[in-house]
Amino acid sequence: MGQNSTAQRRCRGRPQIRPDEETLHLLIEAAAVEFQEKGYASATMGNVAQRAGISTKTMYRLIPAKADLFEKVIADRTARFMLAVEPSDLDRYELADAVEHFLIAFGNLALDRETIAMLRLVIGERDRCPELAATFHEVAVTQTTKAMTLWLERQRDRGLLKFDDPVATVSALRGMMVMDLQRTAMLGLAPAPSPEEIKARARICAKLFLDGCRA
């Protein structure tokens, strides 16, 4: 009995080892706040580690540079969109519902307050840190455009849609869904739209798109 009690006390006293995946998530969330509050140039790795409650040694083992940290923040947000538009999931819907679901997922990404804050950061620090724009475009814009293009091409191959230039079609669809709302929010003329407003916008855009492109 005495040995069991001693063993239990020892187990309780040992520090819990946090998985790297969980630690990385904490760092990404802390970095997002740091970048939004301080800007990229003024943000420091030390502050991010402190916000996350993680040692700088552990942070540098997982993320060696601030540029890598910024890329991971953008990639984390983009990954949520990719998960929401898995082709196998979209195939469960009728075409109109699938397009609407796709647009809602894109609207939730592009019109999110954090995304708008990051866009402001990229534009505001473009002269000092031009690499931010390249990272944002490659990780966020290029990847989401590719996912949308591949899905629309798949629907065309199935005989459900008709269009000539898939990239131009996706560009028009993206712009119709978010451009005005995102620009207004970035200028501070209106708050970022609510989930209900995003759904209503997606419904309108899906109908307009399908009226023009349904096979």
Image (cartoon, rainbow, N blue to C red):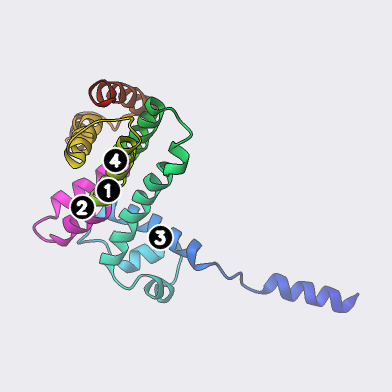
Q: Nearer the viewer, residue 41 or 164?
A: 164
Measure how far apart labels 4 and 2 are at the Cα level: 22 Å
Which residue is farthest left? 127
Q: Nearer the viewer, residue 48 or 91?
A: 91
Measure how far apart labels 1 and 2 are at the Cα level: 12 Å
Which of the two labelled residues, at mark 3 and mark 2, occupies the earlier sequence position? Answer: 3
Badge 1 vs badge 4, beta-carbon distance below 8 Å: no
Q: Is residue 156 above or below residue 59?
A: above
Which image quarter: residue 168?
top left
Which of the two labelled residues, at mark 1 and mark 2, occupies the earlier sequence position? Answer: 2
Which image quarter: residue 172?
top left
Q: Amino acid at mark 1?
A: Lys
Count neighbours of disc 2 (C-alpha within 10 A) and say few if under 14, some if 14 to 19, many if 20 or more.
some
Badge 4 vs badge 2, beta-carbon distance below 8 Å: no
Badge 1 vs badge 3, beta-carbon distance below 8 Å: no
Disc sitting over residue 137 in the figure: 2
Measure how far apart labels 1 and 3 are at the Cα level: 34 Å
Provide the major secondary structure of the magenta segment.
Answer: helix
Which of the two labelled residues, at mark 4 and mark 2, occupies the earlier sequence position? Answer: 2
Disc sitting over residue 51 in the figure: 3
Q: Nearer the viewer, residue 79 or 32?
A: 79
Disc sitting over residue 146 in the figure: 1
Count neighbours of disc 4 (C-alpha within 10 A) and say few if under 14, some if 14 to 19, many if 20 or more.
some
Which of the two labelled residues, at mark 1 and mark 3, occupies the earlier sequence position? Answer: 3
Q: Locate residue 71, reporting x and y percent.
A: 29, 60
Residue 185 appearing in the image: no
Q: Disc 4 designates what residue? A: 153
Q: What range is drawn magenta here?
A: 113-139
